[in-house]
Image: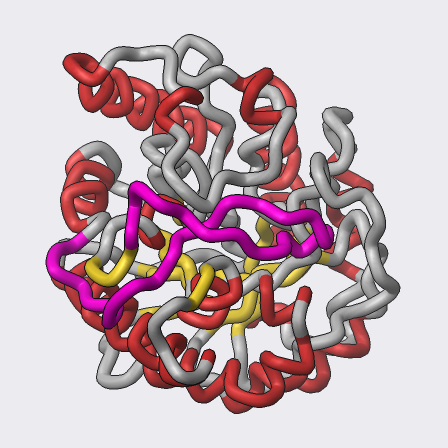
Amino acid sequence: MRLPLFPCTIVGSYPQPDWLIDREKLAQRFPPRTRARELWRIGDDYLREAQDDATRLAIQDQERAGLDIVSDGEIRRESYSNHYATAWDGIDIDNPGQALDRSGEPVFVPRIVGPIRRSHSVAVEDVKFLRANTGKAIKMTVPGPFTMTQQAQNDYYSSELDCAMDYAIAVNEEIKDLFAAGADVVQIDEPYMQARPEKAKEYGIAVLNRALEGVNGKTCVHICFGYAALIHDRPEGYSFLPEFADANCNQVSIETAQSNLDCTVLESLPDKQILLGVLDLSTQEIETVETIKARVLRSLPYINKERVILAPDCGMKYLSLESAFGKLQAMCEAARQLREEFS
């Protein structure tokens, strides 16, 4: 990838159009951990075609906004994680379990009844579709092994670590195939390392590094405070972030906008590129270019400008299409002005 100073990207998701998915139903529940076919407005016979069309629109919006690295918007997914967590062997799809969501509420989750094995790829065809529909650098996202372990009911493994390691092996195989299919960046989503830091400190980095073992390609890890539309309170800082200095990833994606994060923590990650969250997703309001520039500038005493990548705080799934596009457009204009000022 040949990228400019202050390149711009999306974290993962972009809003799905209301003709494709029932956005009212989506907003009234926690992100599904098991399958949620009732969210789709299109019947099975035409669902894939409709998802293709909506994905093209998401790609075009990202290009028009000015992003340097685009994703497929996770348009084909009911949530960032269930797309994968229900796809591999070892899961009883018909008889789900229960676990506590990061909010503390019980939700239905995949129930593990056998060894987790990747019998097929989940997103290789999605990468190929994305690659065929843009000349930009492309990114694909996968849920991380620690988070998938926390979002499951384990009725098979003797320990969480054993379960997470098998998830890590499956994720590792998927990542390698995604790069082989044309991905420029693969992002691993690990929000539960922030939600459950004590367990993450026990084995989170170990399983993450297993998922990255032997991978040749640019990798990113996203850690967040949860979707702003669903999790309203933000802590003052990350409970699990400096630990990523020991992770074998190239980039770490964090939130700074809504939380007004103390950016001194960036000094603890001197060897990582940082996807700096500069768009507040708790509001539909489109930030001014000056507001976004200020969020970037306050990070620069603690990180070299060459390591900064501009991004939203988290996935944009719950925003309106108009708000998401406007926010990305403002971010890209802020980046353009910053390049001029620092050139």
Q: Closer to the camera, 133 or 231?
A: 231
Q: Quadrant of residue 286?
A: top right
The magenta region covers 92-121
Q: Which residue corresponds to the image point at 68% horizontal and 82% vertical from the top-left?
A: 198
Residue 284 as seen in the image, left or right of residue 244:
right
- Which of the image's four quarters has the C terminus? bottom right
Q: Closer to the camera, 210 or 342?
A: 210
Q: Which residue corresponds to the image point at 18% horizontal and 37% vertical from the top-left?
A: 129
Q: Quadrant of residue 325?
A: top right
Residue 187 x %, y % = 41, 61
Q: Which residue corresponds to the image point at 41% horizontal and 36% vertical from the top-left?
A: 73
Q: Residue furthest top?
A: 19
Q: Closer to the camera, 141 or 296?
A: 141
Q: Is residue 243 above or below residue 171?
A: below
Residue 79 x %, y % = 45, 40
Q: Is residue 60 above or below residue 310?
A: above
Q: Quadrant of residue 306?
A: bottom right
Residue 100 part of the magenta-drawn span: yes
The reply to whether residue 81 is visible in this rendering is yes
Q: Is residue 131 above or below residue 320?
A: below
Residue 168 part of the magenta-drawn span: no
Magenta region's main secondary structure? strand
Q: Which residue corresponds to the image point at 85% horizontal and 56% vertical from the top-left?
A: 260
- Which of the image's four quarters has the N terminus? bottom left
Residue 294 x %, y % = 81, 51
